[in-house]
Image (tube, rainbow, N blue to C red):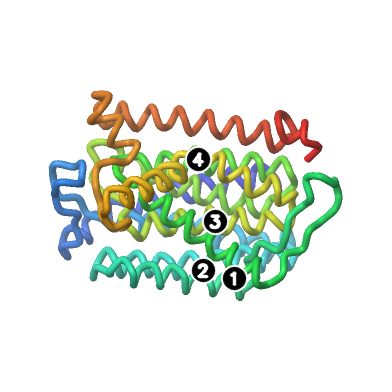
């Protein structure tokens, strides 16, 4: 697998997503699947909210087609890589269904949490689990996790990333752009460390986000909805978990935390803030980081989104340097 294959995957995903997005927007509008205006939402007009379907179609079309071609032409023979890609496609389809159910029918927060947990558990049983870590004090010494620790840590990882990504989806173009930037950062990192199948998955995700972004940037014609946010979070979580068996876990779990630091930190602050105020953690508000850029610092939506893009690019650069052994990890001998 070479750079040309990754470029083809990205272009196919971009084209398929761009083609599918206006069709999905029209369908969502006609059947009444729109995000209404209320006190906690930032748009002034109702928006069709099934954009995640279009992004997923671009992602799955490119990944399914390219992987099928590679297998048929004997260019992808690693059974572990095929196992990982097929499992990720299946798991992402399941979580998309959960998000669609919530977007169309509405789910209670507890029910949605349980559904996310079920999908994470299925992925765990399939073999996507955090098995252990490299001892930072003794290089080359691997610490194997017992099942009672590995299983809950894996489930927690899935739940944290899926919900962190879902929480930050609050401004036009924010999550789609963050996905493209963070996905490209992780793609470069995985490629430089010899994980082409993970780079392939990320190329499809980046392409899907890029094809969707022109329709989602302010003023948005369509939004991702829960189906898109949960799907994106699932892909990021799974790619990082798969990478733990191929790269130093002490680094591989740190890298996504750095690349996705904004949504993860925003989620942590949101939970503490709502709990401190005596509110339900699942109760929506306008206290997120991206909201503060608008209401406290006076930025408009495009300015706030572009600023967050810049921060994501900076975080991606830091993650790339750390993954190459530059900085504190190198000093620590990791």
Residue found at the far top of this picture: 298
User: Is residue 43 visible in this depiction of the protein?
Assistant: yes
Q: Going from the N terminus, do you reach mark 3 or mark 4 first?
A: 3
Circle nearer the viewer, 3 or 4: 4
Quarter of the figure with residue 289: top left
Q: Say which residue label 2 marks.
A: 120
Q: Are marks 2 and 4 in contact (CB under 8 Å)?
A: no
Residue 186 to residue 24: above or below: above
- In space, the residues marked 3 and 4 are separated at their CA atoms by 13 Å
Pick the front one: 320 or 275: 275
SS for dot 1: helix
SS for dot 4: helix
Whether residue 21 sits left or right of residue 63 in the image: it is left
Label number found at residue 124: 1
Residue 130 to residue 136: above or below: below
Residue 296 to residue 147: above or below: above
The C terminus appears in which quarter of the rendering?
top right
The residue lying at 56 percent from left, 49 percent from top is: 202
Whether residue 149 sits left or right of residue 75 in the image: it is left
Q: Residues within 10 Å of mark 4 (few under 14, many from 20)?
A: some
Label number found at residue 261: 4
Q: Going from the N terminus, do you reach mark 2 or mark 4 first?
A: 2
Q: Say which residue label 3 marks.
A: 237
Q: Are marks 1 and 2 in contact (CB under 8 Å)?
A: yes
Residue 91 to residue 213: above or below: below
């Amino acid at each position: 697998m070479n750079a040309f294959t990754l470029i083809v995957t990205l272009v196919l995903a971009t084209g398929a997503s761009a083609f599918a997005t206006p069709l999905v927007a029209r369908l969502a509008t006609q059947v009444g699947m729109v995000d209404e205006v209320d006190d906690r939402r930032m748009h002034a007009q109702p928006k069709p909210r099934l954009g995640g379907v279009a992004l997923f179609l671009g992602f799955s079309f490119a990944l399914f087609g390219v992987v099928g071609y590679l297998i048929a032409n004997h260019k992808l023979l690693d059974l572990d890589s095929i196992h990982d890609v097929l499992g990720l496609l299946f798991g992402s389809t399941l979580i998309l269904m959960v998000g669609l159910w919530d977007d169309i029918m509405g789910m209670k927060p507890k029910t949605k949490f349980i559904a996310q947990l079920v999908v994470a558990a299925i992925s765990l049983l399939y073999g996507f689990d955090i098995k252990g870590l490299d001892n930072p004090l003794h290089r080359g010494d691997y610490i194997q996790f017992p099942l009672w620790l590995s299983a809950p840590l894996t489930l927690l990882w899935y739940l944290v990333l899926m919900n962190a990504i879902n929480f930050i989806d609050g401004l036009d173009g924010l999550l789609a752009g963050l996905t493209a930037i963070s996905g490209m950062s992780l793609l470069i990192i995985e490629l430089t460390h010899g994980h082409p199948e993970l780079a392939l998955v990320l190329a499809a995700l980046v392409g899907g986000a890029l094809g969707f972004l022109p329709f989602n940037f302010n003023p948005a014609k369509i939004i991702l909805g829960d189906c898109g946010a949960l799907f994106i979070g699932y892909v990021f979580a799974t790619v990082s978990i798969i990478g733990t068996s191929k790269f130093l876990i002490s680094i591989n779990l740190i890298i996504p935390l750095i690349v996705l630091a904004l949504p993860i930190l925003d989620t942590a602050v949101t939970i503490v803030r709502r709990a401190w105020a005596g509110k339900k953690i699942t109760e929506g508000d306008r206290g997120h980081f991206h909201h503060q850029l608008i209401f406290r610092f006076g930025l408009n939506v495009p300015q706030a989104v572009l600023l967050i893009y810049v921060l994501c690019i900076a975080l991606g650069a830091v993650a790339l340097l750390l993954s190459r052994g530059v900085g504190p990890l190198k000093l620590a001998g990791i």
